Amino acid sequence: MGAGGRMSIPPEGKKSKSDVIQRVPHSKPQFSLGDIKKAIPPHCFQRSVLRSFSYVVYDLTIASLLCYVASTYIQFLPNPLSYFGWLLYWICQGCVLTGVWVVAHECGHHAFSDYQWLDDTVGLILHSSLLVPYFSWKYSHRRHHSNTGSLERDEVFVPRVKSGIRWISKNLNNPPGRVLLLVFQLTLGWPLYLMFNVSGRHYDRFACHYNPNSPMYSDRERAQILISDAGVLAVTCGLYRLTAAKGLAWVFCVYGGPLLVVNGFLVLITYLQHTHPSLPHYDSSEWDWLRGALATVDRDWGILNKVFHNITDTHVSHHLFSTMPHYHAMEATKAIKPILGNYYQFDGTPIFKAMWREAKECIYVERDEGDQNKGVFWYNNTL
């Protein structure tokens, strides 16, 4: 298992050396971003319109087939098999549509093609179809990439310092409480982030992805926020008309269920990429872009790595070079590992085990004892 991973606790209850977290070095690295880029084959930075569109066609074809099979044949299954059939469809379709979400995410990073207008057009259509305000999220996500690991300026999954822990976190720091928080986070976390900036960066006034006057946007970006709103509104109107024709139950089964799965995957993927006991967080006295970009972790999602276009197991390289297309990210990741050394983090812990562990141990961040004057913070699991 790579750096950051841990083996199970030995039967006698004592931790082995491999069970101890290996932290990412927090000192400034001896290599530069240019050194990392030189290690990557030049073709990895080349974007192909045809290849990028092939993933769109592939994902949408599978999604269409799943939709056809589910809407045509599940109704003929006897109860309770029909309920199991719909649940299976939601999971499978949700996985495929998460791949569609990732392609739209690439458009927001200008990693889809060499043409910004094409990236924005494809991204707007794909993200709007999943009720995501494309330009709104594109700009807030860009600021996340510009400020990763910063306690003051990062945009999402910003950890709290110990003094900022709320009473509810203390009262829910137990197995039933963690289950409740995880269910809440995976079902409502994404829409609450878009609407109310929940778990996002603190702003002096109300921040919302649908509001063009939100403090997270500059004046030149505000008109495009309205375009994002129009895209989401158009899809919402289409769903309303479809509901009038087919009924609410049909629309929820065919579209709403898979969308809940997509939203849950999105939250879980990003949560696990940026939440790990080995990752440092920095205040303004220590933070710099390269160390912040390296404060991320690659995870192993098994077969879903491919379904999700490797956004899960190539996240470190993505944060270093976000305009690189996903289909070159694996090759780039292999190329940069020798340069990064211990700065590269990979955790092969099974995903649901990792989710539970991080929810239990990554509650707040604080400085190490003896390093109180340093602006480097680590997760601590004791309340």
Image (cartoon, rainbow, N blue to C red):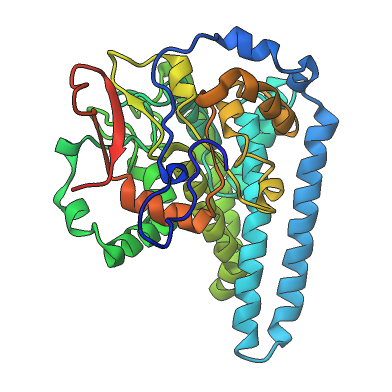
Residue farthest to the right, as pictured: 50
**Foreground residue among 57 and 268:** 268
Location of residue 125 by image quarter = top right
Figure disc tally: 0
Return the x and y of residue 305 as percentages of the image width and height.
67, 47
Quarter that holds the N terminus:
top right
| Residue 355 position in % (x across, y down) | 44, 53
Q: Taking 375 as reference, is 35 above or below it?
A: above
Residue 246 can be seen in this image? no
Judge by depth and name the residue closer to the eye, 193 or 273: 273
> Which residue is rendered at x = 72% and y = 65% of the image?
67
The residue nearer to you, when weighing 15 against 92, is 15
In the current view of this chain or complex, which residue is farthest to the bottom? 78
Residue 61 in the image, given as x and y percentages of width and height: 80, 54
For this view, does 114 lie left or right of residue 272?
A: right
Which image quarter: residue 193?
A: top left
- In the rendered image, is residue 78 in sight? yes
Q: Nearer the viewer, residue 40 or 61?
A: 40
Residue at left offset 49%, top offset 39%: 273
Give the x, y percent position of residue 165.
18, 43
Residue 180, picture quadrant? bottom left
Query: In the picture shown, does residue 1 fall above or below 332?
Result: below
Residue found 62% across the figure and 9% down from its top: 35
